[in-house]
Image (cartoon, rainbow, N blue to C red):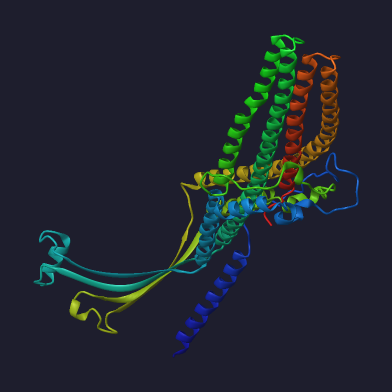
Amino acid sequence: MNTSSYQNTFKMKKYLNRFAFVLVILSACNVSKNVETPKAALPDTFRNAAATADTSSIGDIPWKSFFTDVTLQKLIDSAIVKNYDMQLAIKNIEASQLLVKQVKWNYVPQADLNVTANTTRPSDNSLTGLSLAQYGIASKHIEDYSANLSLSWEADIWAKIRNQNKSALAAYLQTAEAKKAVQTNIVAYVSQGYYNLLMLDDQVAIANRNVALNDSTLRIIKLQYDAGQVTSLAVQQAEAQRMAAAELIPQFERDITLQENALQILTGELPGKIARNATLNDITFTENLSAGIPSALVSRRPDVRSQELALTIANAKVGINKSAMYPALRITAEGGVNSFKASNWFNIPASLFGIVGGSVLQPLLDHKELKTQYQVAKVEREQTVIQFRQSVLVAVGEVSDAQVKIEKLKVQQDIAAKRLRTLQQAIANSKLLFQNGMANYLEVITAQSNVLQSELELASIKRSELSAVSELYKALGGGWR
């Protein structure tokens, strides 16, 4: 190699090294500044929460440890596996996982294999035809055979590919959080449906007891009617009271069937009967339903975590749109074999060819459109920040709502239980007074009607309290562990 060639080679290497260094520096830059996850304004404690130093939360308890009823556990297990919303959430995770794997290949050059063979018969009066005649080429056909491998690579100068990777990963994590949210909802809905079913069982039993009680009263009044002590109106009133209690039985039985069907569908099963042995009063929870501290809620609630990830996606989208406004550097290379005759197609090395090139593309006329897309992406990012703050606010509100429901329903249940005991004593007293002629039949019927309504109301309050506990567990982000 002569001195001139050596110097040219040295200069070329020097320029390439400088160019590579510039690429490294540029690729380390990010054309847009990310917005950090805002610090949510959270209270020190939840409203209606009892003052305590305990920072633990029932939201951290696995659902099988929180809901201990065996039948309920089986229903929830079935729903987690067979519920169609859950199955769709799992499929979304699988699809997102494939996209995360795919986007990593954006760093790899695009490679294409191209094999072509064609023949052309130009017009005698065309420029090509006249050129062939001028050079004395008798053939009327021009053949071209080519087999080549082409490579194309875009330098990630403005972190566009890195932002695409961040966006794809955050979207994948969002699907995982969505699955957690679906499971949390399933656990809450199944438990609340199960508690409603137990309440209906209790109410059917209450209605049957009251029918039997009214039968006893009706027999006594009929005996007094036969003895001429009361009129037929008393018999009719007693019969009407009995039918009012009996009318409730088919209504509750209908509601039981509908609730069983709804639970079965929720658990991915065909509508059918649900075998159960527990009663509404068998379901109990610990008195200390600790909610923990509000700051821990942000990391536990799947919907809030999903909004955090949405901000990551929004940041990446801003970066991608900003980088589209800057020049794009693309390096291409192509090599293979080419020949005008099929017999010489793979004549190596005579048929070998190679091309290396680089290009810089700077948008001009569509720059305004790209700028608008960039500005829209920034506005959407601001919307994401607002949605995150809103999700935190809603989460804190749901916890406070569930806590006050539990607190006030307990008070309401105590009052209803005392009222029921008083009314039950009134029934016994009214019967004795009626049998001794010291009270009329209307007082007996009224006492029995009051007891029926009070018993039904107490069962409803108990169900509402258990449902509120499920709401609190869900609001605290429990149920996906």
Decide which of 31, 284 is in the foreground and name it: 284
Image side of residue 210 versus residue 363, left or right = right
Relative vertical location of residue 35 with respect to residue 261 in this rendering, above or below: below
- Describe residue 479's horizontal placement relative to residue 266 as left or right: right
Is any part of residue 346 visible from this angle?
Answer: yes
The residue nearer to you, when weighing 454 against 65, is 454
What residue lies at 61% left-to-right and 37% top-to-bottom? 256
Q: Which of 6 and 419 is in front in this view?
A: 419
Question: Nearest the camera: 237 or 378?
Answer: 237
- Left or right of 408 on screen, residue 252: left
Image quadrant containing the C terminus? bottom right
| Image quarter of the N terminus | bottom left
**Residue 215 x %, y %:** 70, 25
Which residue shows up at 49% across the image and 69% down it?
108
Snapshot quadrant of residue 222: top right
* Residue 3, x across and y down, in percent: 47, 88
Q: Is residue 128 above or below residue 42?
A: below
The tally of labels here is 0
**In the rendering, at what x and y percent does residue 127 appear?**
16, 61
Residue 374 lies, in percent from the top left, at 57, 47
